Image: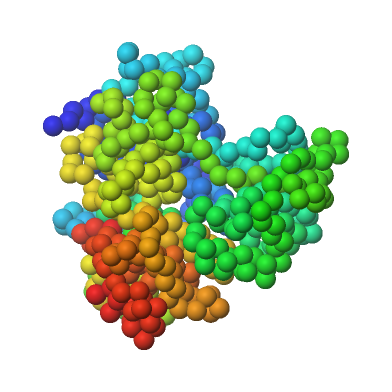
């Protein structure tokens, strides 16, 4: 069902999964991110510093770049070979082997507790 | 050090204004923030209006910049459907069209653009629409049905994006462009050729080098368009997509310098220390190219929102960004990095026939000025990096596909 105030899906009967975003300076932010919402959206909707998201989630800008915590990388996986995301990341500033574009990670119940870190800058 | 307890009033609740309000809170502004928007909707993203929204692939929640609850949760007083009539700099107030006055300590103008109208007396006919706002998109959407006949005047980004969306909805589409090629002001010749071919293959009829002289109507509803070449084309609807002009009247009436946009410096400040201006409505320095320009883009709106919020909060200014643009049409993703100033040489990398290629624009000394990339995200990203670093390249190596993009950028 939809939340009448936000127009967004409310996850029913279960706890909302949490994501912890850690700023480049080490400041953590733990927020609820509804299932089906992108990790980028979770940051923007909660005004978390360090995610620009210029293109609004179209995988066109690489300004929602995050590093996925090592414990979560097996569950999240890396961008597919030859994907738009992989190509964008290959030239993103300060990319690492654990880099992802957070607009391409969709929240699932089994990602409850996910930890991502933000790079020094998005441009 | 700034006093972050004062009242910031933001006029315009689009991408720039909405982002500025959020960034002020993110950067620690303590005082009241009032965000005043003329449209009845909370801040939303305009780029999908010509694409996913028109095709019915988005819900309103997808379109919103942030959820409606964000504003009260962050102590941002959002006033939608509220027109600002004047700025009174002497008393530090904005006057609303209702007569109410809102006092400010700092004012951010984020008034955006409006769609240019055709200088034709009959352009008020029913079935003639522009596309700038959500309300415009909702007027346009029901006109794009299977076999409905739509004429799009203007082959810029909006015109061509709507053409692609309309074709996917089964409408018959004619695009009329006054200049000799599509995307005349925003793309290079080779890129225009490529997009023209793609739209022809998609079943769009394109007429270039023709001006619109008149509309025919049947009971006040548009029925045909007359062209300067003598042709009359019957239609069910017309989209006028002949560019946008900055909303600068509020600023100019208040004595602020305007010249194709409100003049601002690199921190988005006008000449009045209490007033900033951000987004499409500004004429701003573009330091990378050592000139001033008016940029119409979401990245520009966000960059200037950061500049103004950082300046107000006493933070270090954000690093200058390379201007960039994107457009999605059919199965094509166009990404453009930089601006094509002082171009001496243009080099195509890859085969346009494969619909995966990039066009590099180089200055006389080989500096990469701009890169237009079609389904070529690595070239776009590498191009953006090379432009930022003022990288010089040799044209023959750009064209040589045996030289990897990584080698080229390195």
Q: Position of residue B395 (x, y in %)?
A: 35, 74
In this rendering, the answer to whether B79 lies above or below A68 is above
Q: Position of residue B338 (x, y in %)?
A: 37, 58
- For image coordinates 49% across by 61% down, the residue present is B188
- Front in this rendered view, residue A103 or B403: B403
- For image coordinates 32% across by 35% down, the residue present is B264
Q: From the viewer's perspective, is A91 left or right of B49?
A: left
Q: From the viewer's perspective, is A81 left or right of B273?
A: right
- For image coordinates 38% across by 44% down, the residue present is B293
- Front in this rendered view, residue B324 or B20: B324
How is the model colour-coded? rainbow
Q: From the viewer's perspective, is A23 left or right of A107?
A: left
Q: Position of residue A45 (x, y in %)?
A: 38, 49
Is residue A46 visible in the rendered image? The answer is yes
Give the quarter of the figure containing the C terminus of chain B.
bottom left
Q: Position of residue B363 (x, y in %)?
A: 33, 62
In this rendering, the answer to whether B339 lies above or below B364 is above
* Residue at the extreme right: B218
- Front in this rendered view, residue B29 or B68: B29
Is residue A36 visible in the rendered image? The answer is no
Give the quarter of the figure containing the N terminus of chain B.
top left
In this rendering, the answer to whether B316 lies above or below B172 is above
* Residue at the extreme left: B1
- Front in this rendered view, residue A14 or B238: B238
- For image coordinates 49% across by 14% down, the residue present is B99
């Amino acid at each position: 069902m939809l939340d009448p105030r936000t127009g967004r899906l409310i996850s029913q009967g279960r706890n909302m999964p949490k994501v912890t975003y850690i700023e480049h300076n080490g400041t953590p932010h733990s927020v609820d991110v509804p299932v089906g919402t992108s990790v980028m959206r979770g940051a923007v909707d909660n005004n978390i510093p360090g995610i620009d998201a210029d293109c609004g989630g179209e995988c066109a800008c690489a300004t929602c770049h995050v590093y996925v915590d090592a414990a979560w990388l097996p569950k999240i996986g890396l961008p597919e070979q030859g994907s738009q995301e992989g190509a964008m990341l290959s030239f993103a500033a300060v990319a690492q082997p654990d880099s992802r574009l957070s607009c391409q990670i969709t929240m699932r119940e089994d990602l409850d507790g996910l930890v991502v870190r933000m790079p020094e800058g998005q441009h | 050090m700034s006093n972050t307890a004062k009242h910031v009033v933001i006029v315009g609740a689009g991408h720039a204004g909405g982002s500025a309000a959020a960034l002020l809170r993110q950067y620690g502004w303590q005082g009241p923030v009032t965000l005043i928007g003329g449209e009845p909707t909370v801040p939303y993203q305009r780029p999908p209006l010509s694409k996913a929204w028109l095709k019915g692939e988005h819900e309103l929640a997808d379109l919103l910049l942030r959820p409606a609850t964000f504003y009260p949760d962050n102590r941002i007083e959002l006033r939608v459907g509220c027109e600002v009539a004047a700025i009174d700099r002497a008393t530090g107030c904005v006057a609303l069209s209702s007569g109410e006055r809102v006092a400010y300590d700092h004012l951010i103008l984020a008034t955006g653009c409006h769609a240019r109208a055709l200088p034709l007396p009959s352009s008020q006919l029913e079935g003639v629409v522009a596309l700038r706002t959500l309300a415009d998109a909702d007027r346009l959407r029901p006109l794009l049905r299977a076999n409905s006949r739509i004429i799009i005047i203007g082959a810029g980004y909006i015109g061509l994006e709507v053409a692609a969306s309309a074709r996917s909805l089964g409408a018959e589409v004619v695009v009329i462009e006054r200049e000799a090629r599509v995307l005349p002001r925003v793309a290079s010749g080779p890129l225009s050729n490529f997009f023209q071919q793609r739209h022809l293959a998609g079943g769009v009829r394109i007429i270039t080098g023709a001006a619109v002289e008149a509309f025919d109507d049947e009971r006040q509803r548009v029925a045909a368009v007359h062209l300067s070449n003598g042709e009359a084309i019957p239609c069910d609807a017309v989209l006028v997509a002949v560019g946008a002009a900055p909303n600068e009247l509020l600023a100019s009436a208040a004595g602020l310098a305007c010249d194709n946009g409100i003049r601002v410096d690199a921190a988005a400040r006008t000449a009045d220390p209490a007033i900033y201006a951000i987004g499409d409505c500004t004429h701003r320095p573009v330091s990378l190219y050592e000139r001033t320009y008016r940029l119409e883009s979401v990245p520009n709106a966000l960059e200037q929102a950061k500049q103004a919020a950082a300046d107000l909060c006493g933070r270090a200014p954000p690093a200058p960004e390379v201007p960039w643009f994107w457009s999605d049409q059919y199965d094509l993703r166009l990404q453009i990095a930089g601006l094509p100033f002082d171009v001496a040489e243009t080099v195509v990398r890859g085969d346009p026939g494969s619909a995966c290629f990039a066009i590099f624009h180089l200055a006389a000394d080989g500096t990469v000025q701009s890169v237009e990339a079609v389904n070529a995200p690595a070239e776009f990203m590498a191009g953006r990096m090379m432009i930022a670093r003022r990288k010089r390249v040799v044209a023959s190596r750009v064209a040589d596909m045996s030289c990897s993009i990584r080698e080229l950028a390195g």
